[in-house]
Amino acid sequence: DQQVKQNSPSLSVQEGRISILNCDYTNSMFDYFLWYKKYPAEGPTFLISISSIKDKNEDGRFTVFLNKSAKHLSLHIVPSQPGDSAVYFCAASETGANNLFFGTGTRLTVIP
Amino acid sequence: GAVVSQHPSWVICKSGTSVKIECRSLDFQATTMFWYRQFPKQSLMLMATSNEGSKATYEQGVEKDKFLINHASLTLSTLTVTSAHPEDSSFYICSASFDGRSYEQYFGPGTRLTVT
C-alpha cells in the first residue's frame, strides 16, 4: 500500500517558468515531509523539508507547501533551470518512527 | 559534510554467488543506517534498518537470510546478497543518520547489481 503518492510520473517546463511537483499522502500520522532530488545512478540528495506545524517553507528558488487537511504537499521551483532536470521524490515521516516513506518520483525536465 | 559512500558502484555477478555492498559514512558517525532498493520507475523501498552493534530490523517481505546486514561500526554497514538470482538485480541505496531521526538521512550514491 503506497502511503505517499506522486501521481505525475513526468513534467516538462520551459526554463524560467515555474515547476510545480505534487505529492499526496494517506497516513495522517505523518508530521514531517521532505523533497529529494535524484540524478540517474546516484542516491537522492535532500532538497527541502517541512514540518506539519507549518504550511510553507522557502529556500531560495524552492518552496514547499503543505495542506494538511487535503494531505497534500507541493514543491515549487521558480525560476526553473535546466540543471533542475532530475527525478524528484517526496517523502514522509512520523515522529518516533524509524523510516521514510517515499513517493514514486516525478521526472522533471526543464527545457532550455 | 554528511557524506555517505557506497562500494562498489556497480557489480555484475553470476546466479548463485554472493555479493557484498559496503556503505560508509565518511565524516560523521552513523548511529542508524538504512538500506533501500529501487526498481526501475518505482519508489525507494526500505529493506532494513540497522543500528550499530545490534541486529538489523527488516521490513515485511524482506528475507533476512538472503539479505544479510551487518553494522559493525559507527561508520560502516554492509549488505550481503546471498545466493543471488536474476530477480535480485536492482539498484541498492544506503542512507545514514547520525542521531537516529529518520528525517535526517544522508544517502549514498547507490549500487547497481546485475545478476546474470
Image (cartoon, rainbow, N blue to C red):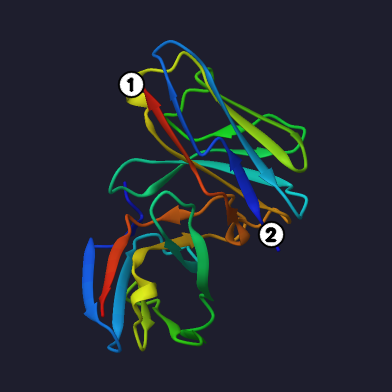
- The residue pinned by badge 2 equals B2
Q: A84 or A72, which is in the foreground?
A: A84
Residue B52 percent location from the top left of the image? 75, 38
Q: Quadrant of residue B99?
A: bottom right
- Circle on res. B111: none
Residue for point 50% across, 71% down: A47
What type is the residue that disc 1 sits on?
A: Pro
Quadrant assignment for the N terminus of chain B:
bottom right
* First reached walking from the N terminus: tag 1 or tag 2: 2
Residues at badges 1 and 2 in contact (C-beta under 8 Å)?
no
Q: Looking at this rendering, what residue extends furthest in the top direction?
A: B16
- The residue tagged with tag 1: helix, strand or loop? helix
Chain name for mark 2: B
Q: Is residue A70 left or right of residue B103?
A: left
Residue A58 visible to the viewer: yes
Chain name for mark 1: B
As drawn, A5 above or below B96: below
Residue B83 percent location from the top left of the image? 46, 13
- Circle on res. B86: 1
- The residue tagged with tag 2: helix, strand or loop? loop
Q: Is residue A43 left or right of residue B42?
A: right
As drawn, A58 above or below A27: below
Residue for point 58% across, 43% down: B34
Residue for point 41% across, 29% down: B61
Q: Quadrant of residue B45?
A: top left
Residue B23 percent location from the top left of the image? 63, 40
Q: Looking at this rendering, what residue extends furthest in the front direction?
A: A112
Quadrant assignment for the C terminus of chain B:
top left
What type is the residue that disc 2 sits on?
A: Ala
Residue for point 42% across, 64% down: A28
